[in-house]
Amino acid sequence: MHGREESKVPWIPANFLALPEGQSDAANAGAILIPIPYDSTTSVKSGARHGPAAIIESSYALEDYDWELDLDVSQVGIHTTAALEPDTGDPARMVERVKQAVAGYVSPRRIVGAIGGDHSVCIGSVLAHLESYPGLSVLYLDAHADLHDEYLGTAWGHSSGARRIRERCPLVLAGIRSMAPDERDYLKKAGIPAFGWPPPRGEGIESYAGRIVDNLSDDVYISVDLDVLDPSLMAAVGTPEPGGLFWQDIIAIISRVAETRRIVGFDINELAPREGPPACAYTAAKLIYKLIGLTAASPHSPVTAA
């Protein structure tokens, strides 16, 4: 396409699920999705900027009806915004750009989800939600701790996301399988609840999920780095880590949050589609749809499906 090489924004398909106008207009939507094709702070393999397009395109293959929830989740109304133009020159400015974009949609009657991009996307999105939910806590699902104060010359990159968030609100880490010494020291100093993977021998996922959620406040934001999943399920990430969660595990954790807390926002990040098979993008799309569905089915959420 003419001019594509000059643009900083990769081509993004029209909208999640390819929903018709009546189910995808912003005014009536119970869920807002914001594609953020940004990966300028990636430290190993780049390509997460192509994640939003791959996820949205893969969502066209999803069935509207979720048989486990007995719910047509599309009836919530899902609006996909235009892709956010990235600021590739300054990570701090990009955080502010994400914050402003997300803040414009945060509302008690809907859930807002950011689709990255690298995991630094979470910082601005959480800051936006904190303005409306001062009692917010964050469930940070990631194979890595992301607690570096600074990494590769910036304090606002994907390896510092959890630390920037913890400086502003309560944080719970889950799925952790990799951590540097400075991250371990900060984790202990800050008293951050951290749940590695797999669960302790003999403890089932339901019990483990319950202990994770016990550390969260009433209003919860969920941040997902897709490398929290096992590479056999999610190979298409820049920093895969063996021994991760499988589909039933992450759904069990999110389900427990939805059953007992109010999910107010989320982000899904780090899909690098060229690093794995197309099934990875579909899995990411289904995770987004399931998260919206679990929120709609929750007794604690104002988001409902007709």
Image (cartoon, rainbow, N blue to C red):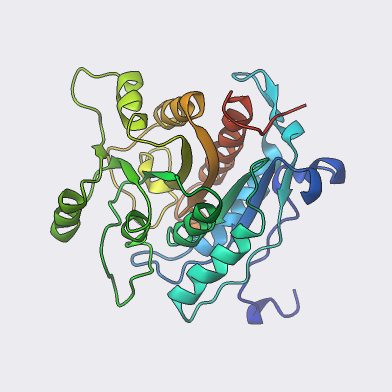
The answer to which of 221 and 217 lies nearer the viewer is 217
Q: Residue at x 64, y 79 (%)?
A: 5
Q: Residue at x 28, y 70 (%)?
A: 151
Q: Residue at x 52, y 34 (%)?
A: 262
59 left or right of 172 in image: right
Where residue 82 appears, as percent x and y from the top left, is 71, 62
Q: Residue furthest front?
A: 134
Instruction: Name the quadrant of the N terminus.
Output: bottom right
Above or below, 165 against 247 in this view is: below
Where residue 85 appears, as percent x and y from the top left, is 62, 71
The answer to which of 64 and 139 lies nearer the viewer is 139
Tally the marks. Answer: 0
Above or below, 243 against 13 in this view is: above
The quadrant in which residue 248 appears is top left
Where residue 161 appears, as percent x and y from the top left, is 37, 59
Above or below, 243 against 65 in this view is: below
| Residue 24 makes an appearance in the image | yes
Where residue 86 appears, as percent x and y from the top left, is 57, 72
Instruction: Name the quadrant of the C terminus.
Output: top right
The quadrant in which residue 301 appears is top right
| Residue 25 makes an appearance in the image | no
32 left or right of 286 in image: right
Q: Residue at x 46, y 43 (%)?
A: 222
The answer to which of 138 and 132 lies nearer the viewer is 132
